[in-house]
Amino acid sequence: MSNFTLYIGNKNNSTWSLRGYLALKHAGVEFDEVLILLRPTIDRKKLDLLTPTGKVPTLKHDEQYIWDSLAIGEYLNDLYPEKSFWPDDISARAHARCVSAEMHSGFVSLRSVMPMACHSQFNTPEVSDDLKKDIERVIDIWMDCRSKYGGKGPFLFGSYSIADMMFAPVVFRFKSYQVKLPEILEEYCDAIVMHPAVQEWLDDADPNDAVEPDDR
Ligand SMILES: N[C@@H](CCC(=O)N[C@@H](CS)C(=O)NCC(=O)O)C(=O)O
């Protein structure tokens, strides 16, 4: 039994769980995974019993709980600074932290109208002004990061970082709902999908898990 345990939701749908999982995979540590069902009905009893805030992801490391995806990334970065969770350059690092925080706290319309279902394809929903604004903002962020910092690799800041973990679920949303992207960003999305940790997640994600508009 490992001294890291990650509590997660259904892999086909739980965007925040995916982020926490990618951070642990990047750390390269052994960890136990505990699935708490969010679909078809939420296992509220288990969620409240096993996590301090009734939310996933929650990481338990020995007696320490970390109950938020971005905080999990930061915690693992503190434990394993040699794993380069953030870009080395201070300016790139500040930028990566800004876009990660922006993803973490915003994009309400995108998250609500285009819930993640990794393995599914849907028609593009009606694009309201708010949804259009969110999609355009993601495209601007990605274009800006790739052009300023992406020269040395396929990810937002060249090398894979927490910023890519934070945006990975958006890649699946854009793919599922057939959002048209500039060619250079299609390449970025492919790099995310082909990442070995993302592939492992996809292998375990049950395509039958339902999806409903919600803030996920
Ligand atoms: N800000 C949190 C959000 C966590 C979150 O909302 N997780 C959802 C699943 S993706 C959840 O646990 N929902 C259960 C509930 O709200 O009852 C994070 O980054 O970890």
Image (cartoon, helix red, strand yellow):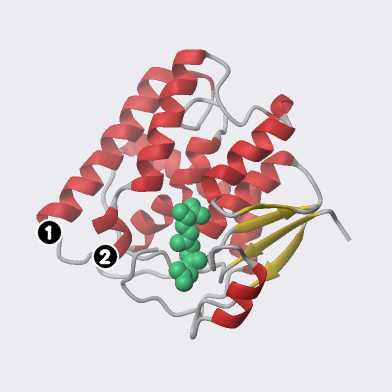
Alpha carbon of mark 1 to alpha carbon of mark 2: how far? Answer: 10 Å
Tell me if I can see residue 47 in this picture.
yes
Residue that lies at the very extreme toward the bottom in this rendered image: 41
Label disc, if present, on residue 113 of the rendered structure: 2
- Front residue of this view, candidates 190 and 43: 43
Label 1 CB less than 8 angstroms from ligand 1: no
- Residue 203: x and y in percent read 64, 65
**Quarter placement of the C terminus:** bottom left
Tell me the residue that label 1 is attached to: 128
Crowd class of label 2 (few under 14; some 14 to 19; many from 20; radius 10 Å)? many
Residues marked 1 and 2 touching at CB (< 8 Å): yes
Label 2 CB less than 8 angstroms from ligand 1: no
Residue 200, located in which quarter of the rendered image?
bottom right
Q: Judging from the image, what secondary structure is the residue with disc 1 in?
A: loop
Residue at (65% x, 64% y) in the render? 7
Residue that lies at the very extreme toward the left in this rendered image: 129
Name the residue type under label 2: Val
Tell me if I can see residue 13 in this picture.
no
- Front residue of this view, candidates 56 and 183: 56
Crowd class of label 1 (few under 14; some 14 to 19; many from 20; radius 10 Å)? few
Q: Is residue 92 left or right of residue 60?
A: left
Among numbered discs 1 and 2, the one appearing first in the sequence: 2
- Residue 99: x and y in percent read 38, 34
Judge whether 43 appears above or below 189 on screen: below
Residue at (44% x, 80% y) in the render? 210
Residue at (44% x, 20% y) in the render? 149
